[in-house]
Amino acid sequence: MILDFIRDNLDGDSWEKWCDACYRDRFQDQNFIKVPAEYLGDAGIEGFTLSGIAYQCYCPEKDYSNDELYAHLRDKVTKDVGKLIDKDNAKRLKDLGVHHIKEWHFVTPEYKDKRIIAHLEQKRKEVIAAASEDPQTFSYIDPQIRLVPKIAEDFKVELVRLIRNPLVDIKLNMAVKSVSDPDWTTCPAEKIDNIKRKIKAIMNAEEDDGTFKDMLAYWAEAYIKGIEIMSKLQESCGAIYEDLFDLEQQYKKDVSMQSMMNPDHSLNYKLFMDILEKFEDTLRKQFECFSEPSIMELKRDLVSGWLADCSLQFKVK
């Protein structure tokens, strides 16, 4: 889920800004209108379109239990849906130009309990009943109005597009989204053998050396993490994944050539460290959407694949 990569940057204010940006991006051709809350509040909606969509957003203040999260979501829905059928608030909505709400969206990063869906359905029936009893006051409510829960994943395309905008101050955090302390011994034997061979050539060390063993575990773990991270990135942020994959494939060809043309085994270590440094610098320049820890993680994980898959070939004595 894309939420896994942006969660660390979310609070109530930032989530509202993201929601506004996503709705503006998706519904600009339907005359999206933002409702600022500075004067007399937002009237129960963050924004609306002239095509009949209104939305309200909510971001939990902390990591609640399932029951706690449901309670907070339920109370927020109850409060803001109540404004839709509040006679004093009805004039404010009409004055804003809200004239025909077909869908009211409740936008939250995620929900974990189907009870919120049932609660929205209950509230929908209340809204329809109120509009039926007083159609003149609530003329902006469509008789078939739907109350729809929306989550971050529903706006994946818009979020990725915004994340890649250099003017947007938010970074994807890849570093903490992988397996913690994976069992490197589960790495395929063929990959382990390749990594061993490369480490020997780089370090000029034997397998019983303690540092050699540490480096074997380090790069084998990175290889396992890299597979998971790239898989998650492909699923959640396809466009970013494609660009990163293309860069890695092209860079892999160059470093393969550099390592094979190295004439002196004594230069293996220097060559390897130069490759790490230059690749990290390239990632940082071309992917400003990643946090600094993410750049470090991606460097390790992708380079580990070059060690495991024989892209890097170092001279031996």
Image (spheres, grey):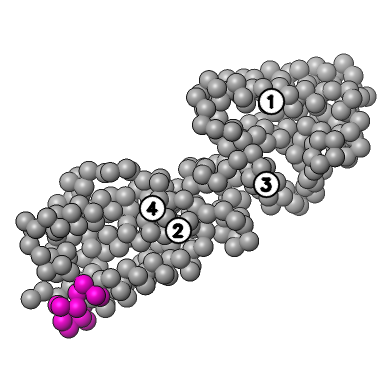
Query: Is 268 inside the magenta-drawn segment?
Result: yes
Q: Which residues are magenta?
A: 260-271
Which tag, 4 or 2, sits closer to the chain's start? 4
Q: Which mark is residue 203?
A: none
Q: Nearer the viewer, mark 1 or mark 2?
A: 2
Q: Which mark is residue 230?
A: 4
Q: Which mark is residue 17?
A: 3
Query: Measuring 91% from the left and 30% from the top, which residue is drawn there?
Result: 91
Query: Measuring 48% from the left and 56% from the top, which residue is drawn there?
Result: 291
Residue 108 picture location, percent across and down:
61, 35
Question: Which corner quadrant holds the C terminus?
Answer: bottom left
The residue that disc 2 covers is 292
Using a 10 Å C-alpha cutoff, classify the residue at mark 2 as few (fewer than 14 neighbours), some (14 to 19) or many (20 or more): some
Residue 155 picture location, percent across and down:
60, 45
Q: Which mark is residue 77?
A: 1
Which tag, 4 or 1, sits closer to the chain's start? 1
Query: Measuring 75% from the left and 51% from the top, which residue is drawn there?
Result: 28
**Mark 3–mark 2 distance (CA, rounded to whole Å):** 23 Å
For the residues labelled 4 and 2, say whether their Cβ atoms are less than 8 Å apart: no
The amino acid beneath tag 2 is Glu
Using a 10 Å C-alpha cutoff, classify the residue at mark 1 as few (fewer than 14 neighbours), some (14 to 19) or many (20 or more): many
Q: Nearer the viewer, mark 1 or mark 3?
A: 3
For the residues labelled 3 and 2, say whether their Cβ atoms are less than 8 Å apart: no
